[in-house]
Image (cartoon, rainbow, N blue to C red):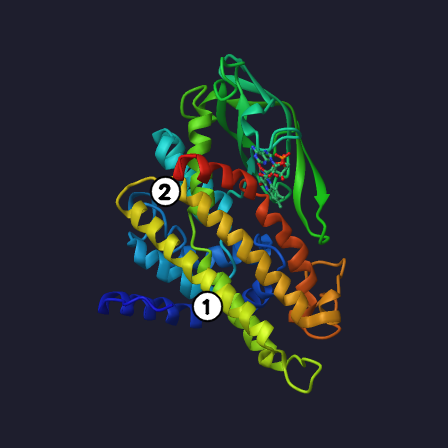
Amino acid sequence: MDIALSPEETAFRDEVRAFLATHLPPAIRAGAAASPSVFVEPDIGQAWNAVLDAKGWLGYQWPEEHGGPGWSPVQRYLFEKECALAGAPNLTVLGLKLVAPVIWTFGTAEQKAFFLPRILSGQDYWCQGFSEPGSGSDLASLQCRAALDGEKYVVNGSKIWTTHAHHANRMFALVRTENGSRKQAGISFLLIDMNHPGVTVRPILTLAGDHEVNQVFLEDVEVPVSDRVGEEGAGWAIAKFLLENERGGSCHAPKLLYDLDLLAAAAKDEPNGLGGTMADDPHWRRRVAQARLEGQALEMIELKILADIAKARAPGPQTSLTKLLASNLRQTIDLMAVDLYGAAGLQLDAERPLYGDDAPPPLHSRAAQLAAPRYLNSRAWTIFGGTNEVQAGIIAKTVLGL
Ligand SMILES: Cc1cc2nc3c(=O)[nH]c(=O)nc-3n(C[C@H](O)[C@H](O)[C@H](O)COP(=O)(O)OP(=O)(O)OC[C@H]3O[C@@H](n4cnc5c(N)ncnc54)[C@H](O)[C@@H]3O)c2cc1C
């Protein structure tokens, strides 16, 4: 879908497009194209972050006072769209888009001055310590404890499904600082140094064979009180703010539509068994059209959220809608890829990464080799950041008033 752009916006889009054409290294682009997960590995992600940081565009959603380029919502959207069209890797959201807004909104002057530049420079790589064994959808039931001891907290407990904890040197975590009258009370938001000796990271391999998530054990981990964000007990409000950003902080539609276009183009080379190609198959064409319509509808809602953010309105529960729609469409497109490639799409290599000189060779094509890992990996979309059922519950309650 083309949105009428002003001459300034067109010039901006062209500037971004020209930059990507000259500054997105082929190896990073190839790595992004061959990453089954939404979370690219740091060799790809951090290298791309450094390119954008050198240009001053990495914090493209950040306020200018903290190092953002001062772009309008339309500019941010155009940037994301051009990055998707150029095949750039997804940006590593945990620092840039999740904890950074928390720090500039709720943090002290010292926290802002210390942590924010380190996110942009890549000195700090963050992971998110929210979920626990037994506390996922019902996050407020979390049990990881932080006991105040003078000027520090002593943290004991466990976090699970912690994405990229094995790469991270810092974790933002929700901990229980007291048994509140309600389970949402008594939760605090801490910034934890992962290099503390009491932190143990145990890998969890996912269905597709990727090592993305972990269980993290915290044993007598000392955290200075100065690394608490917000007041003690104010963690739940901060978590809600962060989760709304997690669900709606980016535009998913450009990337989804780009992947759909690639798939539609690939169908021209896949035989349909009747002497033609899959691109001629009416059932396939209907699926492509249906997915495209869903992607375009999603894009409109994402643009509306950006407009709200520009007016300093919190994105609110409509981010649950985009999370739900984007997750479903991601899985639809990845299922279409498996169907398109047929038997060739069932290759499931155990080795990672699927890019670089040591990547296992594709039996059919690189795109077909990625179909099964992507399909399996994207099962996680309807779980992470809050499951589909939980999003539907939020929409029913807060949007529809049911
Ligand atoms: C790949 C991946 C990466 C992740 N990364 C992180 C991370 O970095 N940091 C982090 O903290 N967490 C992370 N998570 C955890 C994620 O947020 C949780 O898995 C999620 O919130 C669901 O919690 P759960 O796994 O405990 O499932 P449960 O909450 O036990 O849910 C089980 C089932 O019950 C349903 N259900 C639960 N409650 C309700 C309800 N009220 N109404 C209707 N249905 C309900 C759910 O929809 C689901 O189908 C990640 C998860 C995955 C899969």
Q: Position of residue 31 (x, y in %)?
A: 59, 64
Residue at image location 55% in from the left, 44% down from the top: 388
How far, Cα to Cα, is label 1 from label 2?
25 Å
Quadrant containing ligand 1 reads top right
Look at the picture and state if 265 lies above or below 295: below
On the image, numbered disc 2 is attached to which residue? Answer: 315
Along the line of sight, the residue nearer the viewer: 381 or 294: 294
Along the line of sight, the residue nearer the viewer: 229 or 327: 327
Look at the picture and state if 24 lies above or below 180: below
Residue at image location 45% in from the left, 49% down from the top: 322
Horizontal relation, residue 11 to residue 113: left or right: left
Q: Nearer the viewer, mark 1 or mark 2?
A: 2
Image quadrant where residue 129 sits: top right
Horizontal relation, residue 219 to residue 126: left or right: right
On the image, numbered disc 1 is attached to which residue? Answer: 85
Along the line of sight, the residue nearer the viewer: 252 or 79: 252
